[in-house]
Amino acid sequence: MELWSFRSPRTGKEYDYPVFRVVGVSAVVVFALTEKEEVVAIRQFRPAASEIVLELPGGLSDGATSPEDAAWRELLEETGYRAGKIARLAPDPVYFDPASLDFRFLPFLATECEDIGGQLLDEEEDIEVAFFPLSEWVDGVASGEIRTDAKSMATTFLALRTLKTS
């Protein structure tokens, strides 16, 4: 965490504000659909939440590969599924929380996803793959019955918009 000084554009007064920095990486989040129109989600323990969270697959993109390549890789590693097609859902990275975090993610839609034989998890990852009919996922996220994170909610919203117009 760093303390940043900024000048209010409205008042001109200067303030200090805590900002959490994540340097040199961004993230990708993948809304993945099987050919049966099932959402491919993951259950994973998240230390900051101190609980298992149901979310969309994703991970870090360190700039060594394209964000699209990172989305393909993370989907395969975390779920064992390969996308037939993948598309960006936003032209620019989306802020997680611009008030206090400079970290961003790129949302993707992956369609025609198929199981190619198992996850490729890192040693510290403990991920269970879960499947939901599209309407069940959307209704569950919207009602709170499916507890998920903000990045999965935002990516779901963008994916639905894209699916509706295609």
Image: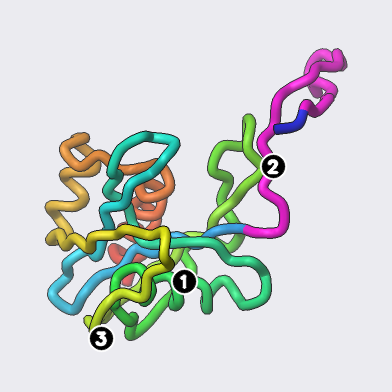
Q: Secondary structure at mark 1?
A: helix
The residue pinned by badge 1 equals 71
Residue 159: horizontal and vertical position, in percent? 35, 60
Furthest residue in direction front, as rendered: 123
Disc 2 versus disc 3: distance between alpha carbons?
36 Å
Residue 76: horizontal and vertical position, in percent? 36, 76
Q: Earlier in the sequence, mark 1 or mark 2?
A: 2
The residue pinned by badge 2 equals 21
Q: Amino acid at mark 1?
A: Ala
Q: Earlier in the sequence, mark 3 or mark 1?
A: 1
Which numbered disc covers residue 116? 3
Q: Residues within 10 Å of mark 2 (few under 14, many from 20)?
A: few
Q: Amino acid at mark 3?
A: Ile
Residue 80: horizontal and vertical position, in percent? 29, 77
Q: Residues within 10 Å of mark 3 (few under 14, many from 20)?
A: few
Depicted 57 relative to depicted 97: above or below:
below
Name the residue rendered at 22%, 63% in the picture: 129
The colour mode here is: rainbow
Q: Are marks 3 and 1 in contact (CB under 8 Å)?
A: no
Range drawn in magenta? 3-25
Disc 1 versus disc 2: distance between alpha carbons?
22 Å
**Residue 16 colored magenta?**
yes
Out of 79 and 101, give the one closest to the viewer: 79
Q: Would you say 33 lies left or right of 158 here?
A: left
Depicted 123 relative to depicted 12: above or below:
below
Q: Nearer the viewer, mark 3 or mark 1?
A: 3
* Residue 113 in which image quadrant: bottom left
Name the residue rendered at 52%, 78% in the picture: 69
Q: Secondary structure at mark 2?
A: loop
Residue 50: horizontal and vertical position, in percent? 35, 35
Out of 60 and 38, give the one closest to the viewer: 60
Name the residue rendered at 54%, 43% in the picture: 96
